[in-house]
Image (cartoon, rainbow, N blue to C red):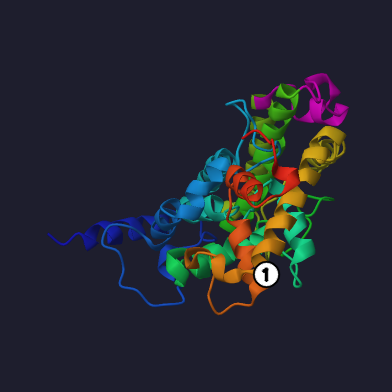
Amino acid sequence: MDLSNVRRRLEARESLLSPLATRSRWAVRRRTEAPDPVRTSFQRDRDRIVHTKAFRRLKHKTQVFIAPQQDHYVTRLTHTIEVAQVARTIARALNLNEDLAEAAALGHDIGHGPFGHAGEEALAECLPDGFRHNYQSVRVLDQLEHRGEGLNLTLQTLEAVEKSSKVREDIFAEGWGVPATLEGQVVKVADAIAYVNHDILDAVRAGIITESDLPDAARIHLGTTHSERLNALVSDVIASSWDATGRGPTRPEPLIRMSAPIAAAANELREFMFQRVYLYDRTRSEAERGKRVVTFLFRHYEQIPEAIDSDYCLDGDPPPRRAADFVSGMTDRYAIRLATELGCEDARDWRV
């Protein structure tokens, strides 16, 4: 039986997608490969990401609250799954390529270090060329995984991962660039929709805020519950981005967007979260402790890069780069345990 008929049937179905959607037959890899018999190129990307060690480690990496003891706090893994769900919902509604959106969503945070953005800040201060988790995600997927060979993902998936990050001021600010594919743009907005909403739940659970503390604009335009906010944001993106289906008035470059009042409410809600949660004294105190642990580990392995397992760095790289790759791959609890063993006072007695 010629199973390649399965893939060809799936590729043929893509002719029904929006004329602005990305077709898997357009996919490009750095190294040429024979097509898979039963999966399209973007399905193959998705599967390769899910089966990596780096993806598994996301289950013990911080989203906002470091090494939480309670079971229901969001981790980097559950965040990633929620982003993929939101991205698929939007992509399906707009008749875009769900497989590309899902692959990019699953890989978008794979380069995050321990202790969330605190760990990222520490590595950015230590590494001469700086450190950004979106660039590190591409590095993990394209170079570090599979013993230094990378996963040979499509350039479309890698580009969407690289440009998934956002600046604080505006969800839709260019920041690190606008993804070339509409599916990549979907992932960028899906990330913001997911993290703002689940971070609210975690902050309420932690007793830092209450639902009634949320800005009036968010409560008026987005609703007063988690499900109402999610539905309002996702529905507005779909309605505001309808040109992406190829069925509305044509524009030279249709972008994934929100309507003006919903975008304003979403940005106000994000800023509220920065001021009341992400930079809250108690949250920030733990974050600063996490930064010191990451800095300690970086300095230690920068001095003895030969102690780093070759699975986590490239042997030919300079010591600072090797140390950054190793430390950024650690989970919160592994970083705390290892730093404790190496004599770091900040890691001592930190429950994990």
Q: Which residue appears at 76% of the width and 53% of the height? A: 172
On the image, which quarter does residue 177 sit in? Answer: bottom right
Res. 162 in view: no
Image coords of residue 163 (percent x, y) = 66, 61
On the image, which quarter does residue 278 sit in? Answer: top right
Is 212 one of the magenta-colored residues? yes
Q: Nearer the viewer, residue 206 or 328?
A: 328
Give the residue number, with chain letter if any, for mark 1.
Answer: 303
Res. 140 in view: yes
Q: Which residue appears at 60% of the width and 42% of the height? A: 333
Horizontal relation, residue 218 to residue 53: left or right: right
**Tally of marks:** 1
For the view shown, which residue lies furthest in the bottom direction? 316
Which image quadrant: the N terminus? bottom left
Which image quadrant: the C terminus? top right
Region rendered in magenta: 207-226
Q: Which residue appears at 75% of the width and 67% of the height? A: 130
Image coords of residue 160 (percent x, y) = 59, 61
Q: Secondary structure at mark 1?
A: helix
Circle 1 residues within 10 Å: few <14, some 14–19, many ≥20 = few
